[in-house]
Amino acid sequence: MLERFAPFIEARLRKNVSTSEQMYRFLSGRLVQRYFGKYKLLKLKKTIKYCYDNSPYYHEQLKNHNCRPEDIKSYSDMKKIPFTNPDDLQKPERFLCTAPSEIIKIFSSSGTTGNPKKISFTRNDILRQASGIADGVLLLYGIDNTDVIRITYDQGYGMSDWGVRYILENVFQYLGATSVVTGGRLPADQEYELLKSYNISVLMGTPSYIHALSMQLSSSFDLKPLNIKCILLGTEPLPSAIRKNIEDIWHTNVYQGYGSTEMGTSLAGECKEKNGMHITESDFHVEIVDPKTNELLEDGEVGELIVTTLSRDGMPLLRYRTHDLGFIMSEQCPCGLPFKKIKVKGRTDEIITIGSGDKLLATIFDDLLFSIPSVDNYRITIERFENIDHLTVIVETKKSGSSLKSKIEQMLMTVPEIRNGILDSKTIMIPTIQLVKPNTIKKTTLKAKRIIDKRKLYD
């Protein structure tokens, strides 16, 4: 019965509903409510078997852990499957379940945090991901072929390709909507002319960039006549104060999404309730585990988000560690959708978000600053004033003078995330360098804490 019913759900989710109202009625109906959990478990089992049969990496991993696909009979059995770590993706060829000739797109991280993570997609993978997000923005925000969407996300640095802009262009092409992108970010006056001349109805970007842009535009222009339908933000946390400020400036609703390059851009988004993000459960299975014990946690308990892809041919991922902290909300959403909701609360590792949503590993500062022989120790404080990140770098040294300050500034500008924030997105000020005598920085914990983040990025 379920084998025959699953394609019906898939078709209705992806093709046979054309309006937001139709989608809501279908998904909140008794038929889907009754069968959706079983349908997702069926997809999960098929994904695990597919990986075992076709991926050299997962076949070896599952065998080494004495786990066979038939051992997974329920969601709780997922704990038998080993985790996939971000570092594992530095050698993606062993993950592939298809011939390399079927891969049409490879996304990667910038490599600042180590060797780049690479994720491969087939044509069908891209189509499924784009159609899934398209269904989501139609369902949740009523975005359709009458809309014009301004996408402000960057593509990446150098050899990197984060995929967000590419996927979003495919999303709106799938919907028949118009997407507007530029080679780089524009000065505020040019951005205003673009929004006005193209009759932009939807604005997309990172919270920090859109907030900074909104402040700049509102100081010179009346934005209400632009009639922006909604603003969709992602790739970094959205504090409630930032959301309210943007909504007040544009007189419209701001919604938050959640995703990553590894997941193909997006896996969850807010509904009209703006209280947690609905997971696209037809394409992703999300677990919450204790980051220290790796034990599965109950809904409502905060832990690390672990994601398994359910609709990918080229390079599926089983139990991928996102290093994001959050929880699955236990209560049913008043909007009526059957999909579970998540809230993201922080990070488990030393990755920090900076500037316009860029992410870098905090230890990059160790590599840079300790490569200078005269640097004994350092501490960096990050604060945010008027939507701009301010870095104060305190360096312990026996040496003094402007030459050392200049050298440190030059070293920091070699970090693409910092350089981009200063020169392109204008979301980072030139760092302030303070030279102090050795043993000046007070040690407050057993383990040296060199990055002090005073921004309130998470509510």
Image: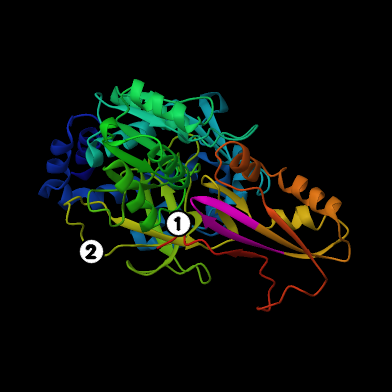
Q: Would residue 402 be counted in the magenta stretch?
A: no
Identified by mark 2, the residue type is Glu
Asked which colour scheme the image uses, the reply is rainbow
Q: Is residue 47 left or right of residue 338?
A: right
Residue 155, horizontal then vertical, whole percent: 53, 32
Mark 2: which secondary structure?
A: loop
Note whether residue 280 is visible: no
Q: Residue drawn at (41%, 68%), measured in percent from left and top?
A: 302
Q: Residue tagged by mark 1?
A: 306
Q: Residue tagged by mark 2?
A: 331
Most foreground residue, 169 or 86: 169
Q: Quadrant of residue 283?
A: top left
Identified by mark 1, the residue type is Ile
Q: Quadrant of the C terminus?
A: bottom left
Q: Quadrant of residue 148?
A: top left
Whether 439 is drawn above or below 288: the answer is below
Most foreground residue, 290 or 347: 347
**Mark 2 or mark 1: which comes first in sequence?**
1
**Foreground: disc 2 or disc 1:** 2
Q: Is residue 57 left or right of residue 68?
A: right
- Which residues, given as a range, are shown in magenta? 379-391
